[in-house]
Image: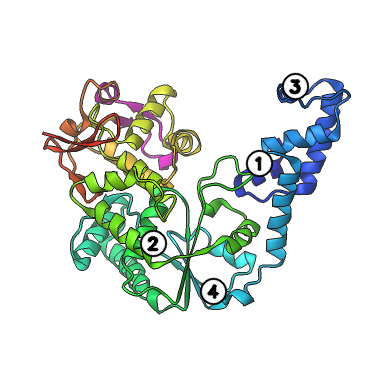
Amino acid sequence: MPNDYRASAYNGHINLEHQRKRAKELLTRLRDGTAVSQQALLERHALYSAPPRLADAQWLIARELGFPSWPKLKAHTDAVDFAARHPQFAADREASTQHWRCGNDIAHSLRVAGFQGEFHMFADPLCMGPAPDVPDLEFLELRCDFISSAFDMPIDDARQRMRGEYRDLARISQAPHAVLWCDADAYDQLFLIAVLAGMTTPPELLELIEISHVPGVERFIGIGQLAPEVLAWLWPQRRRLEASTLELARTAWKAYRASSPQAWAELAFSESLGLPFLAPALRRQLQELPSLRDGLSLTERLVLEIIRELDRPTLGRVFSELMSVREPLPFLGDSMFYALARALIDVGNPLIREFDTQLDWPRRPLELTGLGKLVLDGAAYWVDHASTTRWIGGVRIEPGRPHWALDEALVPKWRP
């Protein structure tokens, strides 16, 4: 498959001229009978004509890219290209805008696209580690300790980085215009509600860009994968956040930080929230609680299943399979995944055995231990064998102690 096709399927920037060339090549194969599966697809949709027409090939190409028709594909590519050529940043006061993101993955692309505002990162991964409802200074220290431990960072470096991010965030109210760029996953949605909940006074103009998919992208992982032109296309789609949205964020952030997941679960199954991606993200994050069946979070179970199904896969292969295929709502970065994996390897009763530790971590082969196989089969309960405390938001899971867990319907239950 051509390299530029693969690029557009990842970064969302579709070259229409290239798609026209692909359609003509496909038409040739339809006419000589070598495009058997595509011809069958046309016949199933009652679109096949003899001899095949260019419109038939164009429809197949558009459908492959996720569009219902060639005109819809053309309209989208025209819109992206127009946005890149006519961003209208000056009319939007973009030069005085603060752009906020839970990482630095789009700062360069925004500059390439022509954005001139300030770029701010708040990268604290609130989907991992302790997030209890405690005073701000205590909360920050807990997060610093977690970042230092989970990501093997000297505590002084962790404090410097985290204090700087939280200090900058506290000044967001002074901005004349702030825009939050968010995906639909738990990492981003928790960043979103944490930022909004912490605002005593919002900026003069507070806006949000949030997406769950992009036309033409085969598997959308996050905004960071998108081409600069697509970021320019997203810019006019931002929306203003009102007081009711800030109130929802405060409610959700309080529920996530509570020691019981019950209020959090109620929000996770709510409908018609003012933040449309919040409930699904909270629902996915809820699945990081232990399952009553085996004591595993969903991420842990997926990792163990991948290792069992593949032949001694490397850590890098497991991460790739998790993010590209298995994870229903991808939220982990590579360093986050590695920290999670260490908690299943570097313990007294590990679930995963690691080999060739002299290699860089992505190249190290893995296999399940005997306990790992038992837990995955539901014949042992992971929390009864674990040796480290685990947090999901404000919910604390102590090894061998009564704790909150999820039943098969994703309802929190107290496990005595």
For marks 2 and 4, the one nearer the N-term is 4
Q: Which mark is residue 325?
A: none
Magenta-highlighted residues: 352-374
Cα–Cα gap, marks 1 and 3: 27 Å
Q: Is residue 64 above or below residue 105?
A: above
Cα–Cα gap, marks 2 and 1: 38 Å
Residue at 39% x, 46% y: name it: 271
Type of amino acid at the residue the image marks with label 4 = Gly
Q: Image quadrant of residue 36?
A: top right
Q: Is residue 229 above or below residue 403?
A: below
Contact between marks 2 and 1 (CB within 8 A): the answer is: no
Q: Which residue is mark 2?
A: 245
Q: Which residue is mark 4?
A: 117
**Element class at badge 3:** helix
Q: Position of residue 301 (x, y in %)?
A: 33, 31
Type of amino acid at the residue the image marks with label 3 = Glu
Q: Position of residue 315 (x, y in %)?
A: 41, 36
Q: Image quadrant of residue 372?
A: top left
Cα–Cα gap, marks 3 and 2: 48 Å
Indicate which label's residue lies in the foreground, 2 or 4: 2
Label 1: few (<14), some (14–19) or many (≥20) C-alpha neighbours in 10 Å = few
Type of amino acid at the residue the image marks with label 1 = Arg
Q: Does the magenta run of residues contain 92?
A: no
Type of amino acid at the residue the image marks with label 2 = Thr
* Quarter of the image that includes the C terminus: top left
Q: Is residue 154 above or below residue 39?
A: below
Work out whether residue 268 or residue 87 is closer to the camera in this orientation and state it. 268
Describe residue 139's horizontal placement relative to residue 217 as left or right.
left
The answer to whether residue 234 of the structure is visible from this angle is yes
Q: Which residue is mark 3?
A: 43
